[in-house]
Image (cartoon, rainbow, N blue to C red):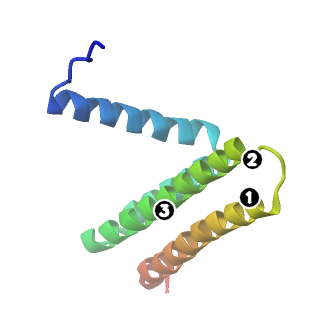
Amino acid sequence: MIKKKKDSFIIDRLKSIRYALRGALKLIRTESSILAQSLVFLGFLLLGWYVGITPYEWIIQIICFGMVLTAEGLNTAIEKLCDFVHPDFHHKIGEVKDISAGAVTFSAGASFIVACFIYYPYFF
């Protein structure tokens, strides 16, 4: 058996980054929920710039955005895996998908509350 030549550590990391970016772009291009969340976050980024939020608030806002997009991405991956494993309707698969979507709701809800805390002082 011929062994494939092992790439260097740096080459392996660059390949990993390339695969990750490919996946992120695929999410943005094909998943309406990711696109919608990205547009909402773009709006909040513009609002943050407009009202002049503090560096600390920027950090918190960006962490929240990342948390929601990560949850959305994981939810999408779980749904696609469920569809692959069991293409027909099954109540257990539906339950898994509902739980996965519920996790997204938790992260989006927490991010909304954080946004209220950040922006309330700028408007009231």
Looking at the image, which is closer to me, 112 or 71? 71
Residue 31 coordinates in the image, percent (x, y): 63, 44
The number of callouts visible is 3
Q: What residue is shown at x 32% (from left), y 36% (from top)? A: 17
Amino acid under label 1?
Answer: Ile
Identify the element where label 3 is drawn: helix
Quick check: 62 left or right of 115?
Answer: left
Gap between marks 1 and 3, in whole Å? 35 Å
Q: Which residue is mark 3?
A: 44
Q: What residue is shown at x 73% (from left), y 66% (from top)? A: 95
Amino acid under label 3?
Answer: Phe
Determine the image quadrant of residue 80. Answer: top right
Looking at the image, which is closer to me, 99 or 18? 99
Considering only vertical position in the picture, is 87 above or below 92?
Answer: above
Residue 97 coordinates in the image, percent (x, y): 69, 60
Q: Which residue is mark 1?
A: 93
Q: Which residue is mark 2?
A: 86
Q: What residue is shown at x 26% (from left), y 17% (from top)? A: 3
Determine the image quadrant of residue 55. Answer: bottom left
Determine the image quadrant of residue 28. Answer: top right
Amino acid under label 2?
Answer: His
